[in-house]
Amino acid sequence: MGVEKARGLVFGDYSSSFDDLRWYVDAVNACNPGSVFYMEFDIDSKGRHFKCLFFAFEAYIHGFKYCRPVLMLDGTFLKGRHKGCLLAATAKDVINLSIAGAICHILCVSLALVLVKVIRYLTPKRDIAFVTDRHGGLLKALAEVFPFSSHSFCLMHLKTNLKTYLSVKSRESKEYLLTLFSRCAYAPTIELFNELFEEFKGRCGRSVEKFLKDLPNECWCNAYFQGKRYGEMCTNVAESFNSWIRDERHLFSTSLVDAIRVKLMEQFSRRREVGNKWNRIVCPFTEKKLEEAFNDTKAWIVKKCSDDIYEIQLDHSVMVDIGKRCCSCRLWKIDCFPCKHGFCAIKRSGKNLNCFLDDYYCVSSYCDSYSHSIYPVPSMWKSNVVVDDDVLLPPLCKRPAGRPRTERIPSKCEIKRIRCSRCGKMGTHNRKTCKQALL
């Protein structure tokens, strides 16, 4: 933390850091041609005040061409005096790759609209699927800019919200309902979804009617989802990015963007070196999944119907069409990756399995994702003298009273488990409220 705070001194104090953004944007564009930076301002009698900044380095933009067309959008609050927030659009190769970000002093509809509009500019002619936490600003922005794209709600956020609507008191019953809700989301067919969903609604009663009323089936369950999200049900990648930059969130605006640039610059370099050492066709993670499928399907019986169509006989029969890359279980279509039935049929056909994998799972795509570098932005010759009167001022916002919090405030639906000093068990009670009978 001390090292990162020291980096903040390079770009001045709280007030001057915003004016340094003007120099920084020009410097980045000079050192990283093709990068996209966009700023908005609020204007009053005192001058121009910072409102929001969108940034995407050229290496991000190039790298996303070789990533799966799924974007996780999520935000995190900044911890410094700025008291703003950072929105990030995160894509996924075999691991993850952040392609774009935006900072502002409040999380508003206009910022979400700016982020989504620039994403449209960065992803021409690609059908993108989005995964979000249902933030109101993002919902409106996506509906306006990407009206025909698929939009999925993060399953983890949905389950967290669902907890507040469940009227059951038993912890075991609540856990079962949450598990049943997940089974509904992962159900591959409409018939299975309807069966599980009726059981879920029957056990919950009327307490979750309002929650389900605002939850279109096509936005959260596999059976009705129309796009391709490559098995991504949550915004975990975006949450990981937020955790990765936890210390940088304390920095002033210009230092914050530059600290993120440095971390990503090093990450790109490391992954480029790793990818260049892989002497294979598909990535190790993909090979591991295929190896697991091979071990699980050794005893399966495969019957050939034609060159492309096969029947897999288990306790039930499944039809696979490797020509159309589909299976009656629907998992191949949902995950855009051969299911175990499909793998078994391809193995029986004697054809090359790699021909049935999307290019996103190949080592060549992984290397291409990180083939461009994020270059340094030297500040040693930066002038400390303001060359004009058009200074960029801090945002129009007031710092709240009291000492700033350093720990995250848990939401009301989160369960914090502690160890009781009386009975020694983990739970939500303490010594004073413990009702455990002691022998």
Image (cartoon, helix red, strand yellow):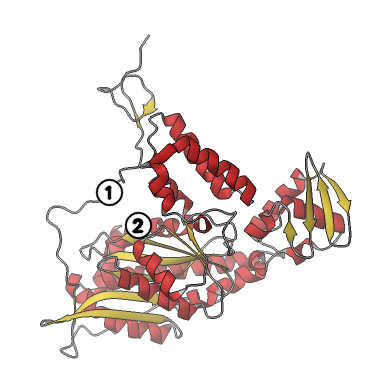
Q: For the C terminus, which image quadrant?
A: top left
- Mark 1 lies on residue: 407
Q: Position of residue 53 (x, y in %)?
A: 32, 75
Amino acid carrying mark 2 in the image = Arg
Q: How many numbered circles does the render carry? A: 2
Give whichever of 386, 71 is nearer the camera.
Answer: 71
Amino acid type at circle 1 is Glu
Compared across the picture, whether 326 is left or right of 365 comes to: right
Classify mark 2: residues with Cα within 10 Å, few (<14), some (14-19) or many (20+).
Answer: some
In the displayed structure image, the side of residue 192 where residue 147 appears, left or right:
left
Q: Is residue 429 left or right of residue 294?
A: left
SS of the residue at dot 1?
Answer: loop
At which x and y percent is residue 211? Answer: 40, 48
Q: Residue at x 55, y 60 (%)?
A: 95
The CA span between labels 1 and 2 is 11 Å
Which x, y percent locates residue 149? Answer: 52, 70
Seen at 33% across and 58% down, the residue is 247
Question: Can you tell which mark lies on residue 246?
Answer: 2
